[in-house]
Image (cartoon, rainbow, N blue to C red):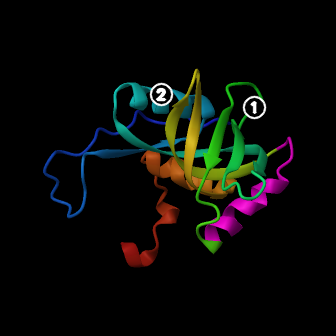
């Protein structure tokens, strides 16, 4: 069943009591490709610095031949194969061994897709929108449901350990 999330929380105040917190960057967690497309394109149009945490399926991925440094992704919705689709480019995959390991598994993605968690920024490429992927790794339904519960303030009593009470 598709996740219906609450509206995004507003940004923090200019002078946050939390050390290091700033109102210049917003994190937006999206469980649908269309939601990420709307959120990201609106951020670009309004000149806002928004990081998108996207849960989606990667149905295709490939790397540019050497000396190329890009890994390309096609992201599809978790729940269906209908458009919109989002393309993404990860330019950091060869900058660290764990980024290479995390992103390499998607090179074997099938049309059915591999579930992924991508941290990205939306960019405009001519008439198309694409994701500038900052990090990507495999995800599970357990990950999706856990994050959805956090986003929607749904915490079950059985998820709180006895030490937390």
Q: Is residue 41 shown left or right of residue 45?
A: right
| Residue 41 disc label | 2
Residue 106 belongs to the span the image colors magenta: yes
* Screen quadrant of the N terminus: top right
The span shown in magenta is 98-112
Residue 49 belongs to the span the image colors magenta: no
- Label 1 – label 2 distance at C-alpha: 22 Å
State the SS at label 1: loop
- The tally of labels here is 2
Give the residue pinned by disc 1: 80
The overriding secondary structure of the stretch rendered in magenta is helix
Q: Are marks 1 and 2 in contact (CB under 8 Å)?
A: no
Residue 142 is situated, as x and y percent measured from the top left of the image, at 65, 57
Residue 9 is situated, as x and y percent measured from the top left of the image, at 34, 39
**Residue located 71% across and 44% down the image:** 73
**Residue located 59% across and 67% down the image:** 95
Q: Is residue 44 shown left or right of residue 55?
A: left
Q: How crowded is mark 1: few (under 14 residues within 10 Å), some or many (20 or more)?
A: few
Above or below, comparing residue 107 to residue 29 in the picture: below
Residue 40 is situated, as x and y percent measured from the top left of the image, at 48, 33
State the SS at label 2: helix
């Amino acid at each position: 069943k598709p996740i219906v999330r609450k509206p995004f929380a507003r940004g923090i105040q200019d002078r946050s009591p939390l050390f290091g917190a700033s109102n210049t960057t917003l994190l937006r967690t999206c469980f649908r490709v269309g939601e990420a497309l709307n959120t990201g394109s609106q951020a670009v149009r309004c000149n806002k610095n928004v990081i998108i945490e996207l849960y989606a399926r990667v149905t295709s991925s490939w790397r540019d031949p050497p000396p190329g440094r890009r890994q390309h992704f096609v992201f599809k919705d978790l729940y269906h194969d209908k458009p919109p689709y989002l393309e993404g480019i990860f330019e950091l995959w060869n900058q660290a061994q764990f980024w290479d390991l995390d992103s390499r598994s998607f090179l074997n993605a099938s049309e059915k897709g591999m579930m992924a968690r991508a941290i990205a920024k939306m960019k405009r490429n001519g008439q198309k929108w694409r994701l500038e992927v900052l990090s990507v790794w495999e995800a599970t339904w357990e990950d999706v449901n856990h994050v959805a519960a956090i986003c929607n303030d749904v915490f079950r009593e059985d998820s709180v350990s006895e030490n937390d009470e």
